[in-house]
Amino acid sequence: MDRPLTYMDGETLMNTVLPPIRFVISQLLPQGLHVLAGAPKVGKSWLSLWLCLQVAKGEPAWEFSTTQGDVLYLCLEDSYSRIQNRLLDITDDAPPNLFFATMSEKLHSGLEQQIERFLVVHPDTVLIVIDTLQRIRGGVNDANPYASDYRDLGILKELADKHRIAILLIHHLRKMNDDDLMNMISGTTGISGATDTNFVLRKSKRSSNSATLYCTGRDIEYRELSLEFDSAEHIWKLTEDSVEQPARPQDELVFFLSEFLNQRRYFTGTATELAEALDEFAGEQYKPNVLMKKLLRCQQELLEQGIILSTRRTHDRRELTLRVGCVGNDGKNDTGPVSDLLSQPSQLSQEKPVPPE
């Protein structure tokens, strides 16, 4: 096959507006392929069922917001009677956009096609949970188990990436302890290596109602969530998060820029000059290099507020331009002359803006 390599230079990549990674559960579960591993009967299924409910309803999972959408839960070790009993233990209001199946084909034998067909019928799907991973795998006769693990999970990752959904695989831990909990995920490192995020649910004692959810991944910050199982409600409740919430969320910058451009409508200059202007306008201090990176990261959010960012290099400096674009009836940004934009009324008060709580 003589197919040329597709590539992009660094400057173009930095300035290209790409769709942001979609988080099904903010800061915790992005689009992609993920594994939730734990010892047998530790409470993985209770946790995954509750997460499915929260996403289907669009309600927070602990302190994290969710993206509401259709959810498919493949409960391949359960019957509908057991699922019904668990639902009744957790809730009295199961949503119609949460779907269950107790049987499916295996990988390489039709599962991929079954998922594709489900997504055609339910295009608003955001999350698929497969409980358990081993149930969808055939006998492994490969001389290289690592390659087999990586190849099997690669099929599911390709599906998740193609449709921008999250696929969560429920899996087991080895019995042998390891200083790195992620090495305790059953199978070869091909499993943990092929996934975007790995979660390990572990109790200090089998009889304890307390556990820790260890979270690590490509698109999330490492964190440890201390959980307590409420036996009356059958829900894992959050008692402590090892990560403090950031003092300055990224959308705060979008807010300040929106207010800033409501007054000026247009800005051209270096990142240093913009940082100085924001300090004078709102009393907010940003380091120029940090500000530039934040701007590039939140281009999509800026566009949603009608703000267009562009950059260019001159012989002695790198300039950025921020301007307000009018959104036409076709939903596209129409960047007319700045003089036209300046004639538009401004709703900005003269007081320094205060970001929303």
Image (cartoon, helix red, strand yellow):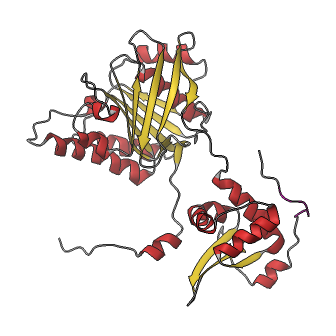
The residue furthest right is 350
Is 354 included in the stretch rendered in magenta? Answer: no
Quarter of the image that includes the C terminus: top right
| Magenta-highlighted residues | 348-353
> Percent x, y for residue 242?
54, 34
Residue sitting at x 70%, y 72%: 274
Image side of residue 134 versus residue 284, left or right:
left
Asked whether 191 or 117 is in front, the reply is 191
Among the 4 quarters of the image, the one containing residue 53: top right
Picture quarter with the N terminus = bottom left
Quadrant of the image occupied by residue 335: bottom right
Image x and y of residue 336, in percent: 72, 82
Closest to the observer, 105 or 348? 348
Asked if 167 appears above or below 49 in the picture, the reply is: below
Counting from the top left corner in percent of width and height, residue 309 is at: 63, 72
The reply to whether residue 110 is in sight is: no
- On the image, the x and y values in percent for residue 120 come to 43, 47
* Of the pair 204 and 100, the residue shown nearer to us: 204
**313 to 260, vertically: above or below:** below
Can the viewer see residue 160? yes
Is residue 198 shown above or below 31?
Answer: above
